[in-house]
Image: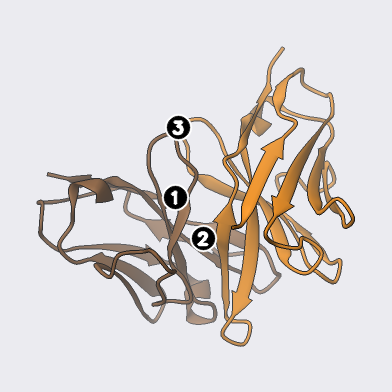
Amino acid sequence: EVQLVESGGGLIQPGESLRLSCAASGITVSSDYMSWVRQAPGKGLEWVSTLYAGGDTYYADSVKGRFTISRDNPKNTLFLQMNSLRVEDTAFYYCARDRMGVAGRAYYFDRWGQGTLVTVSS
Amino acid sequence: SYQLTQDPAVSVALGQTVRITCQGDGLRSYYASWYQQKSGQAPILVIYARDNRPSGIPDRFSGSSSGDTASLTITGAQAEDEADYYCNSRDISGNRLFGGGTKLTVL
């Protein structure tokens, strides 16, 4: 059974840093595409970042230069390092497995964690 | 990058058929996927690669596309289908994107 368990969320002040973790079981994070998706309270889903198995990384413009996605292969864990946090980064952060199919024409998130809440407030 | 546009809210009578649409230029190149999110829960995948259902998703859920528009159809909507639905795809730069979501009410 696939499980993705996020941790590391909490209350933090603007300008500070936080690192989120996503512990995976039933999948191998180094062999899959892995992503972070966030959702501000009462708002829609927003893609944050993707890490390809080969190491390529992608970021939404809203977090580029501030957030870094990475993984620890032996621990089978995905991370999101978040620096220079802003009030507008307040959201539930979900870890998700990102799949590709149909000769690169289909991309979708087939497994999701339960999320961790990050609140940025003074 | 382009945007994915969804109607904010749709309603359907119990047992009837409803279609939720997602429009975006990039859907001419990349297939859409669809997610159901119930209040207080994480999203779940209900349709991927335009018209494929993951294991465990009822066959009343189906997907289709035409041109720049993808559709999620629920045939015979049930009370438990009341949720927010999001479409998702990617752009040519590798970025993923979501539609704004459609709140489905089952009357």
| Helix, strand or loop under label 1 | loop
Q: Nearer the viewer, mark 3 or mark 1?
A: 3
Q: Nearer the viewer, mark 3 or mark 2?
A: 3
Circle nearer the N terminus (2, 1): 2
User: What colour scheme has been applied to the protein in the rendered image?
Assistant: by chain
Q: Residue at x 85, y 52 (%)?
A: A70
In the rendered view, does B68 fall on the left or right side of A21? left
Q: Residue at x 36, y 64 (%)?
A: B57
The residue to which callout 1 is attached is B100
Chain containing the residue with disc 1: B
Amino acid at pointer 3: Gly
User: Which one is nearer the viewer's eye here, B26 or A21?
Assistant: A21
Task: Give the CA separation, mark 2 to mark 1.
Answer: 9 Å
Badge 1: residue crowd in 10 Å (few <14, some 14–19, many ≥20): many
- Provide the letter of the chain coloured orange: A
Tell me if label 3 and label 1 are in contact, CB under 8 Å: no
User: Which one is nearer the viewer's eye here, A30 or B28?
Assistant: A30
Picture colour for chain B: brown
The residue to which callout 3 is attached is A42
The residue to which callout 2 is attached is B3
